[in-house]
Image (cartoon, rainbow, N blue to C red):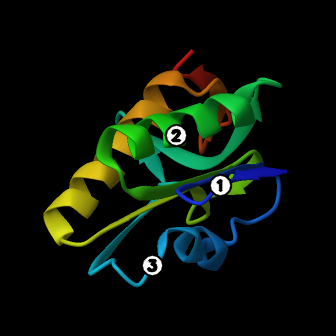
Amino acid sequence: MSVATEQVFAAITDEPIDEAAVRSAVEADESGAVVLFAGVVRNHDSGHSVLSLDYQAHPDAERVLAECCSAIADETGLRVAAAHRVGHLEVGDVALFAAASAAHRTEAFDACERLVERIKATVPIWKRQHGADGTSEWVGL
């Protein structure tokens, strides 16, 4: 499922993120800069080895993700897009892909950073880390 308007694209998926779709949602003839962010599952956290993650989303998560994108688009007047993956992810998989475009790079970088920070702070998605030592724990609850 996804939400799309002229300035906003937001999606939560249990499939690998279609990075080209996220990027194309922000590209426009007036844009001289397109900033892309890929949040990738890493192999460590707080000194512990991580093998994989399981992401779970609240039923309202996609609506909240779309609200985050809309708020940044409204605040900046720019095109923004984001997709978050849920389910089981391995090290190297993309969990969050965000994009912003603007006439100039400074505005695009700023909008993309603001978007990612807002998503991380407000979208109800939780992750369970699976460690190399056989343990698992919920993170960021």
Question: Residue 11 in the image: x percent, y percent?
Answer: 71, 51
Frontmost residue, 113 versus 111: 111
Q: Looking at the picture, does residue 20 appear above or below residue 68?
A: below
Q: Which one is earlier in the sequence, the residue at label 2 or at label 1?
A: 1
Residue wearing tag 1: 5
Residue drawn 65% across the image and 74% down it: 21
Local secondary structure at mark 1 = loop
Question: Residue 81 in the image: x percent, y percent?
Answer: 53, 57
Q: Which one is earlier in the sequence, the residue at label 3 or at label 1?
A: 1
Under mark 2, the amino acid is Ser
Image-based side of 132 in relation to 114, left or right: right
On the question of residue 45 being in view, the answer is no
Residue drawn 68% across the image and 36% down it: 134
Q: Are marks 2 and 3 in contact (CB under 8 Å)?
A: no
Residue wearing tag 2: 70
Question: Residue 37 in the image: x percent, y percent?
Answer: 41, 62
On the question of residue 104 being in view, the answer is yes
